[in-house]
Image: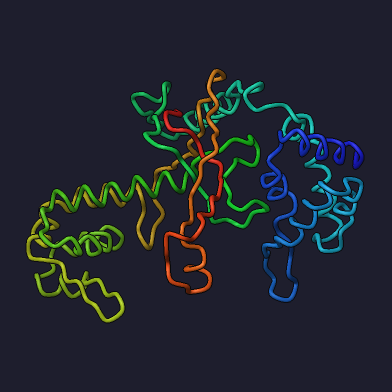
């Protein structure tokens, strides 16, 4: 098994058909610190293994008995996971050759099960065709990675995706902006008060006088205080039922939301490459790193990174 793993890693690396960041993140990224009783990121182990894959592939077998990897049971589970996944995730086949969107069928099956046990399922009107990116998508660029930059890949399906938590966050942010817009607040900073209201408000707050309401929902940041306006106060009193609906969807500080947001997975069209190479150009590296005067004589430093192409659904 170890030899097969080494062969696959080596061939995939040479052919540039395996995202080593995804592989290493799945099996090596975390180690266990008994002293602090928590998992920690061990990027050094990743970098060490990456070098071995490129320079001395046979040394990869040391990973499976590495004392830094937590315990015998953890190593056995890792080996078992690799055995289960090796036929699909790590055989070096270009992604678009096996892009049958099988995860979409899995999701439909999951939704059917949830519906049968009592969950109410709602679909977007254009769910089958999907929502389309109007520009390139890059998630998790700053995460620890053996590459200069990172891109978030699904650990089971090996495709880039938007986590359900991010989908929920974006939708919640839209709800906050919509509420702020309808309240017709004149001070943009009041949006912080709106967020605080949506997170904490109760039906009892409708009875609060203006002064008490402002005191409760004043947003404090460092030494700055942002007080909700009288206009926001009366809008709250007239729309407290709408606030309750928003809270039921997204939750509050004391209660989780009742709506489950699933991951957003790409609809892969085999005729198109949906993972592309993008670039950022740092123009003043000596200025940022050494504090030198920025000038046109500095050479740009291109940094390439993976992104999901615009137009992807």
Query: Which residue is rendered at x = 44% and y = 47% of the image?
Result: 166
Please determine whether, in this image, residue 308 is positioned above or below residue 248. above
Image quarter (top left, top right, bottom left or bottom right) of the C terminus: top left
Left/right of residue 190 with respect to residue 313 in the rendered view: left
Which quadrant, please, contains the N terminus? top right
Residue 7 in the image: x percent, y percent? 87, 36
Q: Going 36% across and 53% down the picture, which residue do you hit?
A: 251
Total of numbered circles in the picture? 0
Residue located farthest toward the front when viewing the structure as drawn:
297
Residue 201, position in %: x, y? 25, 61
Vertical side of 12 occupied by 98: above or below: above
Q: Is residue 156 left or right of residue 225?
A: right
Residue at 33 percent across and 49 percent down: it is 172
Q: Residue at x 19, y 63 (%)?
A: 190
Judge by depth and name the residue closer to the eye, 80 or 41.
Answer: 41
In this view, the residue farthest toward the top is: 271
Above or below for 239 versus 67:
above
Q: Judge whether 294 appears above or below 99 on screen.
A: below
Q: What coloring was used for the rendering?
A: rainbow
Give the side of residue 121 with respect to residue 243, left or right: right
Depth order, front residue of 74/91: 91
- Residue 80: percent from the left, percent from the top? 82, 42
């Amino acid at each position: 098994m170890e030899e097969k793993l080494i062969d696959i890693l080596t061939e995939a690396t040479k052919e540039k058909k395996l995202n080593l960041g995804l592989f290493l993140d799945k099996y090596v990224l975390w180690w266990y610190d008994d002293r602090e009783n928590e998992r920690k990121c061990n990027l050094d182990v990743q970098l060490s293994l990456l070098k071995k894959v490129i320079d001395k592939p046979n040394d990869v077998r040391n990973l499976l008995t590495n004392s830094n990897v937590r315990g015998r049971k953890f190593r056995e589970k890792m080996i078992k996971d690799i055995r289960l996944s090796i036929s699909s995730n790590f055989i070096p086949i270009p992604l678009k050759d096996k892009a049958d969107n099988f995860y979409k069928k899995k999701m439909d099956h999951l939704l059917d099960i949830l519906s049968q046990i009592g969950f109410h399922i709602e679909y977007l009107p254009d769910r089958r065709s999907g929502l389309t990116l109007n520009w390139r998508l890059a998630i998790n660029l700053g995460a620890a990675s053996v590459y200069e930059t990172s891109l978030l890949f699904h650990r089971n399906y090996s495709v880039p995706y938007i986590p359900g938590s991010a989908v929920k966050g974006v939708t919640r942010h839209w709800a906050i902006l919509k509420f702020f817009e309808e309240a017709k607040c004149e001070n943009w900073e009041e949006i912080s008060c709106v967020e605080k209201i949506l997170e904490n408000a109760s039906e009892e707050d409708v009875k609060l006088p203006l002064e008490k309401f402002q005191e409760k929902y004043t947003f404090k940041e460092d030494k700055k205080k942002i007080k909700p306006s009288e206009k926001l106060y009366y809008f709250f009193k007239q729309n407290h039922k709408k606030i309750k609906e928003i809270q039921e969807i997204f939750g509050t500080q004391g209660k989780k939301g009742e709506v489950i947001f699933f991951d957003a997975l790409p609809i892969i069209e085999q005729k198109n490459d949906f993972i592309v190479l993008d670039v950022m150009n740092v123009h003043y590296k000596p200025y940022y790193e050494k504090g030198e005067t920025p000038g046109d004589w500095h050479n740009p430093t291109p940094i390439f990174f993976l992104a999901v192409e615009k137009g992807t659904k």
